[in-house]
Image: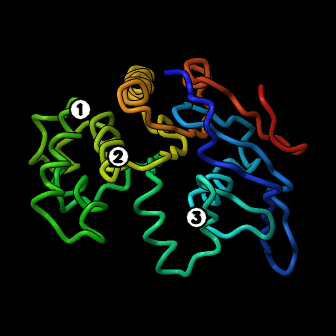
Amino acid sequence: MKNDGKTILSVNSLSKSYHTDGIEVPVLKNISFSVNTGEVVTIMGPSGIGKSTLLNLIGTLDYPDSGTISYQGTNPFLLSDKEIARFRNETIGFVFQFHHLLPEFTALENVMIPSIIYRYDPASAAEKAKEILRQVGLGHRFDHRPAALSGGERQRVAVARALINKPLVVLADEPSGNLDATNSDLLIDLILKLNEQDQRTFIIATHNASIASKSHRVLRLDIDGIHNQ
């Protein structure tokens, strides 16, 4: 779908460095960009340039050294630790290169987890999880544990888990990196379908040119900053 022109995420002058053996290693410097509701945006750049670090920052998994992020006017870094955890759970969905499913839980249970963390309503979470699993083509896999699923199916479960709380934004870090070409194409087609159906906003860090070519917009991250490609 085309975005509605309304800014859902603003990133302003974001910088981050790490310290190794007493040496400061800059990773990101003065990164600024915005994303509109309903966009599928890919972030590309060479390995080690800081794509994952950037997603961790806008996903509130790490704190910047300077700069701000804002989700529809809310800067989550001004919240308390408890408030920021709730904000993350309710506002941001995550899909990683490695699905990070819990092996002892079924597909259904894995998808339910974010919904029950704060709501404590397993019955409602189960119904929502079933609906989303059907939506991603896994209505026949509710009771299968990750070991019984293919790589592509596991990543679809991960996408379903990211969607369970109807987040404003879904962040995907190399979501096709552990998939073959066929399953990679199926994954981006699924993301585009979900975007079209639900106006869900996706930000995807990837090396995959095929995913980038199908997205609405490509941002290039390099040593000079970030810019439209």
Left or right position of 130 against 7: left
Residue 74 on image: x %, y %: 60, 62
Q: Are marks 1 and 2 in contact (CB under 8 Å)?
A: yes
Residue 42 on image: x %, y %: 62, 33
Left or right position of 44 against 56: right
Residue 30 on image: x %, y %: 86, 54
Q: Are marks 2 and 3 in contact (CB under 8 Å)?
A: no
Quarter of the view holding residue 34: top right
Numbered disc total: 3
Left or right position of 16 against 111: right
| Disc 1 packing (10 Å; few <14; some 14–19; many ≥20) | some
Residue 62 vertical position relative to residue 36 in the rendered view, above or below = below
Question: Would you say residue 180 is visible in this rendering?
Answer: no
Query: Marks 3/1: CA distance?
Result: 28 Å
Q: Secondary structure at mark 3?
A: loop
> Which quadrant of the figure contains the C terminus?
top right
Query: Marks 2/3: CA distance?
Result: 17 Å
Q: Amino acid at mark 3?
A: Thr
Residue bearing the label numbered 3: 60
Q: Amino acid at mark 1?
A: Gln
Residue bearing the label numbered 1: 135
Quarter of the view holding residue 148: top left
Residue plotted at (87% across, 72% down):
24
Q: Secondary structure at mark 1?
A: helix
**Disc nearer the start of the sequence (1/2):** 1
| Disc 2 packing (10 Å; few <14; some 14–19; many ≥20) | many
Q: Are marks 3 and 1 in contact (CB under 8 Å)?
A: no
| Disc 3 packing (10 Å; few <14; some 14–19; many ≥20) | some
Residue bearing the label numbered 2: 163
Q: Secondary structure at mark 2?
A: helix
